[in-house]
Each structure stands twice: as structure tokens, then as C-alpha cells.
Image (cartoon, helix red, strand yellow):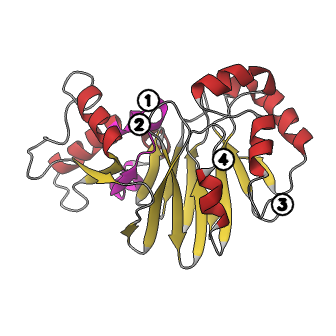
Amino acid sequence: MKIRVLGCYGGQLLGFHLSSFLINDSILLDAGAPTVCLTLEEQRHIEHIFVSHTHLDHIQDIAFLSDNRSLKRLSGEIVNRCITIHSVQENLDILSKHFLNNLVWPDFTMIPNSEDPILKLQAIENYQASVIDGLSITPIPMNHPVPCTGFLLDQDGKQFIYSADTGVSDAIWDVANAQPNLCGLIIDCSFPNDYEFLANISGHMTPKQMAQDLKKLNKLGEVPIYLFHMKPETLAIMSKEIDKENIPHLRMLTQVDEFLL
């Protein structure tokens, strides 16, 4: 299993990319940044996008990725013609009604036609695995103001979890503790401790909340934990507060991180 971090921040400033993770070169977990990080040739290999939820920082590049794919078609591309978007039905409905609606963005599920579109929408269900080229991807319901799922990745007997956006949760730890060979987790940690009120109403965590929630993980201190969705403006404060928690094998993600499990 290959995991490449394209973006890991909860805000967009120069040099800071929004949430997006490339799995095995062909699958995206969220689409905040693929077109600003990947060459056209690398984008060409993307066949699936698993969308955790429909907040703009996790879906914006669906628009530009589909546009680029349509241009590849016009140039004579005959492979990887379609990208399948996987998410719970509530999120697919939101994408159709409010994003791919020919108002905010063209409906690429109908371009060039409904029989051979650029984008296909595929509903998934919580705790039901999808298997793509030997990789199992299972959605986990998370604590966020809109329908949101994390994802359990499982390939070759190794597991990895991406929480997506979440506040304090139980479901993710129940899943994590059930894994026989958990190799790592990516966990939300968005706001400094003084912003706890904002974290609570927006469905995110502070370092203090994150550290408290991590106590539910049986293998705490043994499994690598990577934090994401930090706000670029408060990185210096966040770094100090995270270090103060003194949790072994825990650090903030960066945009040059790549994991081979």
C-alpha cells in the first residue's frame, strides 16, 4: 500500500494544500489538491475518488480534475476515460444538487453523454468494504456537522485509517482496535486549544481534545499517528501544544510525506 500526501491542511494559503491523499497512484481520498500537486500524466492514472464529505476543501479539485480528464479525451485518450466518485448517498446527492449542477460547475456525469461520462457516482455504505485492485476501503461514520466518513484501508494484511474531518468520536477507535495489524492513522487536529469552542461547533479537534480521544486507542504509543487539517495561520502554536502532549510516535503531517506499507 502506497500513500502519498498531496495536501494535509485545513486552510489554503500560498504553499499549503487542502486535504487529499493519493493511494496506490490511482485512488484519491478526498480531492482538495490533486490538480495543483500532480502532473497531467499522474492525474491520468486516477480512476477513483473516495469523498469523505462535501465541504469545499475536500471536493474542489473534482471540478478541475474532471475538466482535465475531458481534455485528455478530446486529445484521443482511450484509457482511464472515467473517474468514479465513491461516497455515502447523502454526499452524492449534495454533489449532484449543489456542485455538479451546471450552475456551480458543469455536470460531468453527463459529459460527453450519460453512457460514457467523465464522472460516475457510486454509493457506498458505512462499514461495507469496497475492493479495488486488492485494496479494501471501508467507510467509518465520523462526528462532523455534515455526513462524513473516515476510511479504513486494508491491503496485504496491513491496515491504515484516515479519520477525515471529525470531532471527538468513538466509531473510529472501535474500528482501529479491531485491526490485527494497524500500521498508522491520520487524525484530525485543526485548532489551537484556545479555539475549542470553534472546534466543537465545526466538528474538529484541538490538541488537548485529540490527546484525550487518543486514549481510546489500545495501541497508543505503538502505532504511528499523523495529524492533519491544521490551520496554516496557527501552525506555530499548534506545534507547541502538540509537543506538550508528549505522545509517542505522533507528529503533524507534511506535504512531502509518503508511506509504503
In this view, the residue in front, 95 or 11, is 95
User: Few, some or many C-alpha atoms within 10 Å of disc 3 (few <14, some 14-19, many ≥20)?
Assistant: some
Location of residue 36 with respect to 43 vertically, above or below: above
* Residue 242 x, y percent position in the rendering: 83, 39
The mark nearer the N terminus, 2 or 4, is: 2
Callout 3, which amino acid?
A: Gly
**Residues rendered magenta in the picture:** 40-62
User: Few, some or many C-alpha atoms within 10 Å of disc 2 (few <14, some 14-19, many ≥20)?
Assistant: many
Q: Is residue 257 visible?
A: no
| Residue shown at 70% from the left, 20% from the top | 197
Give me the C-alpha separation between circle 1 and circle 4.
19 Å
Q: Which residue is mark 4?
A: 187
Q: Which residue is mark 1?
A: 56
Question: Comparing marks 2 and 4, which lies closer to the viewer?
Answer: 4
The mark nearer the N terminus, 1 or 4, is: 1
Location of residue 222 with respect to 134 vertically, above or below: above
Q: Which mark is residue 176?
A: none
Question: Comparing marks 1 and 4, which lies closer to the viewer?
Answer: 4
Q: Which residue is mark 2?
A: 59
Tags 1 and 3 in contact by the CB under 8 Å rule?
no
* Residue 77 x, y percent position in the rendering: 20, 56
Tags 1 and 2 in contact by the CB under 8 Å rule?
yes
Give me the C-alpha separation between circle 2 and circle 3.
33 Å
